[in-house]
């Protein structure tokens, strides 16, 4: 069955009407969908897991490529209420061409989420294929779609690479955020990525902003009986302050971007930070896998649920023994010392903190300090250099292929008083790797805490962005001593 808008214009353009139903499956459903409408449908299919046949429901959002721009713009605010009205389904799917809506594609999504098909990453192409077991023989299925070349979304090579790293056991990455390189662009770039599963949802949520669009993938683990399985969640975030015209074009990108991240076990489309929580993500995963308990408080538990819950001790023991795919090995005491934030690590922490203290100490001649990473894409910081000279001396240690953080001491004269001022310097060299740049967002808060307190900060990637004039201007503005009168 499916519903659509009662009209494309006027008051009825905000109302939904029943449009049709049938028994002919996906082929019959898509024959009812012209290119100039938006439709919301539910398709019923069956999935075979071992010897059991289960019924699955797929929610389909059809966005015809001839739908008017203003109608597309309103869609993002309607999706949540429409999905709630139509009820819980096992899978969501967005498409805008007939080639994207086939029984094979729907089944690929269903099998990928239910676990009846295994997701395999082709190391030569980086693409994922789905293998299902039929009569004990593995058969693989790959799906391609055709799109008209109008405002087609594209991405830099690092985008599929970071998605592959989140999904692969070869990498410690457990989440990644993808966005457009600018609001008017159709090109996707890596915005941020990080490691560790315990707090990956909270870290990701902290980077979401109301004026941007993000496509994210998160890796979690779920215990089903005695098995620990990796689960992947696709999150689409369209901030509430994203301009209407930008929202309008997102519908034409939805299918291609979904295919870029697929297969995943479940998906979440929300502009609400209250939904981007570890508790809600795990709930969506359990609903998709069939392990979520829908019994209301005060009602008796079904016998089947009690029987499954009996080997609880064995499950906990297995969870402790099984490897956590996205978790870093524990550092030995002889290695780098972790900072309080546990996001970064420090080599010889006492030396770094003493160097920063020397910059603050009036009895010390040290005017600046720099720290950097011990290797590209590392999260371990080491002391790079200190000095007693001016800003030019500090800048002589900066490299275009490195990321550095520093504290610079200078003075400001107010009337007859000379005051000490401290500037926090963040240097992102123009030649650093895009994957290293993506991880920096997760480190910024922890590194900043090491250098606190300071009066102003400067982010620079070239020599002309880090000058005495720029620092002095920032200090005067912060202190309220800047002169804003124009010389006419």
Image (cartoon, rainbow, N blue to C red):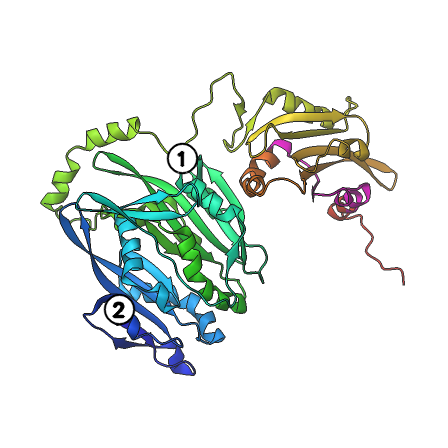
Residue 376, horizontal then vertical, whole percent: 59, 33
Where residue 122 sits, quadrant-wise, is top left
| Residue at horizontal 31 percent and vertical 48 percent from the top | 130
Q: Is residue 345 left or right of residue 164?
A: right
Q: Is residue 455 magenta?
A: yes
Q: Residue drawn 21% across and 47% down?
A: 293
Determine which residue is flagged by label 2: 27
Report the magenta residues as a range: 450-473
From the image, tell me which residue sits under label 1: 326
Q: Is residue 138 left or right of residue 478?
A: left
Residue 203, x across and y down, in percent: 47, 42
Q: Position of residue 14 (x, y in %)?
A: 39, 76
Residue 413 shows in the view: yes
Out of 66 and 4, give the one closest to the viewer.
66
Is disc 1 surrounded by few (<14), some (14 to 19) or many (20+) residues within 10 Å? many
Is residue 409 in the magenta section? no
- Residue 264 - label: none
Instruction: Give the vertical position of 189 relative to 97 (above or below).
Output: above
Q: Is residue 32 placed above or below 171 in the rendered structure?
A: below
């Amino acid at each position: 069955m499916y519903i659509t808008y009662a009209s494309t214009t006027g008051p009825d353009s905000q109302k939904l009407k029943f449009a049709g139903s049938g028994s002919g499956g996906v082929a019959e459903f898509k024959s009812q969908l012209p290119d100039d409408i938006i439709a919301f449908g539910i398709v019923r299919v069956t999935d075979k897991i071992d010897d059991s046949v289960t019924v699955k429901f797929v929610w389909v959002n059809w966005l015809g490529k001839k739908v008017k721009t203003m109608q597309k713009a309103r869609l993002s605010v309607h999706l949540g209420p429409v999905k709630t009205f139509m009820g819980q389904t096992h899978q969501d799917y967005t498409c805008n061409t007939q080639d994207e809506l086939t029984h094979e594609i729907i089944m690929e999504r269903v099998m990928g989420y239910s676990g009846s098909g295994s997701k395999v990453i082709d190391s030569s192409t980086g693409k994922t294929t789905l293998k299902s077991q039929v009569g004990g023989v593995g058969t693989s299925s790959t799906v391609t779609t055709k799109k008209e070349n109008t405002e087609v979304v594209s991405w830099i090579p690092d985008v599929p690479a970071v998605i592959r790293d989140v999904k692969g056991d070869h990498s410690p990455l457990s989440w990644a955020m993808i966005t457009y390189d600018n609001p008017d662009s159709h090109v996707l770039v890596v915005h941020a990525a990080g490691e560790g599963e315990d707090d990956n949802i909270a870290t990701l949520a902290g980077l979401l902003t109301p004026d941007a669009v993000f496509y994210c993938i998160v890796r979690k683990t779920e215990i089903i009986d005695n098995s620990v399985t990796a689960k992947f969640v696709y999150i689409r975030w369209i901030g509430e302050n994203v301009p209407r015209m930008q929202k309008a074009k997102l519908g034409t990108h939805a299918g291609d971007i979904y295919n870029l991240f697929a297969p995943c076990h479940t998906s979440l489309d929300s502009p609400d930070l209250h939904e981007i929580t570890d508790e809600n993500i795990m709930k969506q995963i359990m609903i998709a896998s069939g392990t979520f308990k829908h019994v209301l408080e005060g009602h008796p538990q079904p016998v089947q649920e009690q029987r499954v819950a009996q080997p609880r001790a064995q499950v906990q023991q297995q969870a402790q023994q099984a490897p956590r795919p996205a978790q870093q090995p524990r550092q030995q005491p002889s290695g780098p010392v972790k900072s309080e934030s546990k996001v970064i690590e420090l080599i010889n922490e006492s030396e770094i903190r003493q160097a920063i203290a020397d910059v603050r100490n009036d009895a010390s001649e040290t005017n600046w300090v720099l720290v950097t990473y011990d290797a590209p894409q590392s999260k371990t910081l080491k002391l790079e250099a200190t000095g007693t000279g001016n800003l030019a001396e500090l800048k002589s240690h900066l490299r275009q292929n490195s990321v550095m953080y520093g504290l610079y001491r200078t003075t400001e004269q107010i009337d007859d008083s000379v005051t000490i001022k401290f500037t926090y310097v963040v240097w992102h060299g123009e030649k650093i790797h895009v994957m290293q740049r993506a991880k920096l967002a997760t480190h910024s808060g922890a590194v900043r805490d090491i250098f606190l307190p300071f009066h102003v900060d400067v982010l620079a990637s070239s020599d002309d962005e880090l000058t005495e004039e720029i620092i002095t201007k920032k200090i005067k503005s912060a202190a309220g001593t800047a002169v804003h009168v124009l010389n006419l």
